[in-house]
Image (spheres, rainbow, N blue to C red):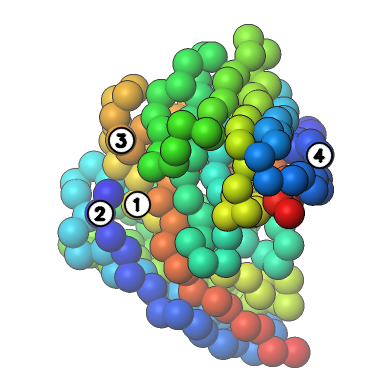
Amino acid sequence: KAGVTQTPRYLIKTRGQQVTLSCSPISGHRSVSWYQQTPGQGLQFLFEYFSETQRNKGNFPGRFSGRQFSNSRSEMNVSTLELGDSALYLCASSLTASQNYGYTFGSGTRLTVV
Amino acid sequence: DAKTTQPNSMESNEEEPVHLPCNHSTISGTDYIHWYRQLPSQGPEYVIHGLTSNVNNRMASLAIAEDRKSSTLILHRATLRDAAVYYCILRARANAGGTSYGKLTFGQGTILTVHP
């Protein structure tokens, strides 16, 4: 079956712009999480959505937001981009957010802010 | 979230077994132990998870200490494709809206190098 699909794979944006990243989870998966990966901070949790509702949020400024649609597809948005937002953004999906299930990750979107 | 401690790096030879340790002395009774790995230029990949009993799947085995304060991920025959960063993660039981809900807390992991 198809894995987690993230689009676009690469993106270059200018400081101050906004960006929207897309994630299509595995069919049937209803929990979608987002992570930011940088060399300095490693993998950090951004937020998690289940049934179109944000259930948990990491320690990121309000410029980072997301949403989930009725088909479980998810988008994340970063407004007023800063140089420090350059990172690999990863989406992961699971049947549920239960601790007894693993998450499947996509290959990520590499965002470069110049 | 309870903390895990892993060695920064380990090395192995191809075709040999690899034992990747993880200490989690503050684990609670309901925390599950999860392992993920991340190959270069890819997103993390789920490997295995367990609660109390040892677990096996097609990728690896997970051995959990009787007191659950440590665990070991076992790759039975390492291949070059197993070279990756391996993360040991504790997942707490969480209700919707809780700070642990749907969240994986990644540490620095163990960089595994496999020699031909």
The answer to whether B96 is drawn above or below residue B2 in the figure is above
Write down the residue under mark 4: A8
The chain containing the residue under callout 2 comes to B
Mark whose residue sits in front, 2 or 4? 4
Label 3 to label 2, Cα distance in Å? 12 Å
Given the image, on which type of amino acid does mark 2 rest?
A: Ala
* Residue depicted at x 63% and y 14%: A69
* Residue depicted at x 30% and y 42%: B92
SS at badge 1:
strand
Mark whose residue sits in front, 1 or 4? 4
Write down the residue under mark 1: B90
**If you read the primary sequence from the N terminus, does the residue marked by circle 3 or circle 2 appear first?**
2
Given the image, on which type of amino acid does mark 3 rest?
A: Thr
On the image, which quarter does residue B39 sit in? Answer: bottom right
The chain containing the residue under callout 3 comes to B
The answer to whether A13 is drawn above or below residue B108 in the figure is above
On the image, which quarter does residue B15 sit in? Answer: bottom right
**If you read the primary sequence from the N terminus, does the residue marked by circle 3 or circle 1 appear first?**
1
Label 2 to label 4, Cα distance in Å? 35 Å
Write down the residue under mark 3: B99
Q: Which mark is residue A46?
A: none
Mark whose residue sits in front, 3 or 1? 3
Is there any visible trace of residue B34 in the rendered image? no
SS at badge 3:
loop
